Structures are given as C-alpha cells and as structure tokens.
Image (cartoon, helix red, strand yellow):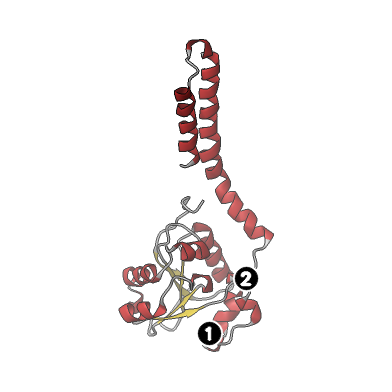
Amino acid sequence: MRFIGHQTQIGLICIGNPDPNSPVLCTCNFKLTFTRLCKLLNKNQINTWLLIAPTGGVNVWCSACGGEFNAGSVIIAIKISSIEKYVNHRTIILPQLSAPRINPNKVNEITGWKCVWGPVNMNDLSDFLKGLPNSIHNKTEKQRKITFKTKFRLEMASLLIFPILLITVIPLSIILYLFNQWDMDSSNLDHDTDTWIFYFSILANFSGS
C-alpha cells in the first residue's frame, strides 16, 4: 500500500523560536509523522528548525527502504529551504530508520552538512536533543531499540482503511455486477472459452491495479 500517499508540503518549519544555534532536524513528508513530530516538539518546548524532505508521502522506514528517503531527498530539503542562512552550524539530525538509503558522505560532499542519526523512536527525541552533542555518540539502549505500539498501528490502519476499501470493494462490486449480468443473459450468450477468458481478464486487471 506504499503507493497511497498522505503528503505534507516539503520545506522548512520553525518549531518554537529557534535561533542560529538551534538543532536542525529532517524528516519525511508523511503527514502522520510530520503531525506527531511537530506536536511532540511543541509539547516539550524544543526550539528547532525542521526540514521536510520529499519522500512521496511515505513514512520514514518505508520510504528509506523503498528508496524515496535518500541522500538526494535530504539534499533537496537543504537546498530549497536555504537553512544555511538561519544557523551558524552545519549539522543535520536524521531519523535513525532512514539510515539504510541515506549516504551521509554524499550529503556532506554536495552541501557541506554533516549527517547524524537521532533516536529510533521520536518520543526519545526530547532527551536526545537536550543531551547534545554528547548524545550523538552515546545513545541509550532505549534510543536504539524500535517498538511498534498498538496505538501507532491503529493510527496507520485508520489512514489506510478508506483507500483499501476504495481499490477493493468498488472493483469487486463491478466484477460481481458483470457476472450477474452474464448469468441473467446466459440464454443469449455462447458459453465458450473466450467468454470466460474475457471475464477473468477483467478480474486480473483489477487485482493488479
């Protein structure tokens, strides 16, 4: 279901009242991730520069594994935001789950920015940021371990249930209608192999869409 995007606009977001020394974070443009991250940072009153990278509206881990969240998308976020005008450092904090596809050397070579990896769970981000710069090389076991709680799974499911129904129930309803029409007009149809191939080709096309 990765092709069903829930996107937010890419670019630069100011959380609180960041200054030239405030940390620079980068995340995906998956709406749920963006909303939860902003809510968390505001709740903990963390003044931050937040870059939104183009990932096709897919969450961090999936977009990294799928190739959307890569060095190129980070470079785009840095370039279009002109973040260098607002800070006096060149360190960008990325989600640890984005590491599979992001080449930090490439980002540094093209932009001059150094990539560091934050905690796995965004709920640990507050402690991580408060512990900078030591926390970069001294993450706790909790900050390295990934968990998917029931609440998060339900949030993901709620976003996908309507699109899933849209691409399954409607096509299946059409197929059932076609078969029903075929039964009603069976006296006028030649029950040959070509007719069956025609209807099953419709089913295959919907299944593969």
The residue lying at 32 percent from left, 81 percent from top is 109
Three-letter code, disc 2 = Ile
Looking at numbered disc 1 in the image, what kind of residue is underneath it?
Ile
Q: Position of residue 100 (x, y in %)?
A: 48, 71
Could you say which is closer to the camera, residue 45 or residue 13? 13
Q: Which mark is residue 136?
A: 1
Residue for point 62% across, 70% down:
146
Whether residue 19 is situated above or below residue 64 in the rendered picture: below
Q: Which residue sits at x=43%, y=64%?
A: 67
Q: Position of residue 35 (x, y in %)?
A: 53, 61
* Residue 150 position within the rendered picture, expressed as x and y whole percent measured from the top left: 68, 59
Q: Nearer the viewer, mark 2 or mark 1?
A: 2
Please provide percent x and percent y for residue 17: 46, 75
The label shown at residue 175 is none
Residue 194 visible to the viewer: yes
The residue pinned by badge 2 equals 146
Q: Give the vertical position of 165 relative to 39 (above or below).
A: above
**SS class, disc 2:** loop
Q: Toward which corner of the image does residue 24 lie, by quadrant?
A: bottom left
Q: Earlier in the sequence, mark 2 or mark 1?
A: 1
Q: Residues within 10 Å of mark 1 (few under 14, many from 20)?
A: some
**Residue 86, visible in the rendered structure:** no
Frontmost residue, 200 versus 131: 200
